[in-house]
Image (cartoon, rainbow, N blue to C red):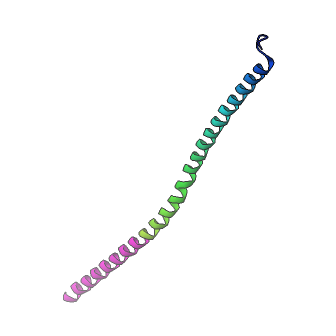
Amino acid sequence: MDDEKPITEQAMETITSAVETTKDAAVSAVKQVKKAAKKVAKKVAPKKAAKKKAKKATKKTAKKSSKKAAKKSAKKAAKKAGKSKKKAKR
C-alpha cells in the first residue's frame, strides 16, 4: 500500500479490485455451468428423441414385416397351387 495515498482511497481501490475479481469469477462460473448444462442436455435429449424414433421405427418395421409375411405366404400358396395343378395334369 502506498503511504502517499489516503487510507480511504486505498481502501476503495482494494474494494473495487475485489469486486471486479469477484464479478469476473462469477461470470466465468456461469459460463462453465451453462457449458456443462448444454453437454448434459445433449446427452439427455437425443435419448428421448431416439426413444420416440424407435417406437415409430418398430411400428413401421412391424407393418413392413407383416406385409412381407403376407406376400410370402401368398407366393407360397400360389406355388403350392401351381405344383398341385402340374401333378394333376400328369
Q: Inspect the magenta stretch and tell me whether residue 46 lies in it.
A: no
Q: Quadrant of residue 65?
A: bottom left
- Foreground residue, 10 or 37? 10
Residue at image point 63% right, 42% down: 33
Question: In this view, which residue lies farthest toward the bottom?
Answer: 88
Q: Position of residue 30 (x, y in %)?
A: 64, 40
Q: Inspect the magenta stretch and tell me whether residue 85 lies in it.
A: yes
Question: In this view, which residue lies farthest toward the top?
Answer: 4
Q: Is residue 86 left or right of residue 71?
A: left
The C terminus, quarter of image: bottom left
Q: Position of residue 87 (x, y in %)?
A: 23, 86
Q: Quadrant of residue 83?
A: bottom left
The span shown in magenta is 62-90
Question: In this view, which residue lies farthest toward the left?
Answer: 89
Q: Is residue 4 above or below residue 68?
A: above
Q: Is residue 76 left or right of residue 59?
A: left
- Foreground residue, 40 or 26? 26
Residue at image point 60% right, 46% down: 37
Q: Position of residue 24 (x, y in %)?
A: 65, 32
The N terminus, quarter of image: top right
Residue at image point 27% right, 81% down: 78
Q: Is residue 45 above or below residue 7?
A: below
Residue at image point 51% right, 59% down: 49
Q: Is residue 35 above or below residue 23?
A: below
Q: Position of residue 26 (x, y in %)?
A: 67, 36
The overriding secondary structure of the stretch rendered in magenta is helix
- Foreground residue, 22 or 13? 13
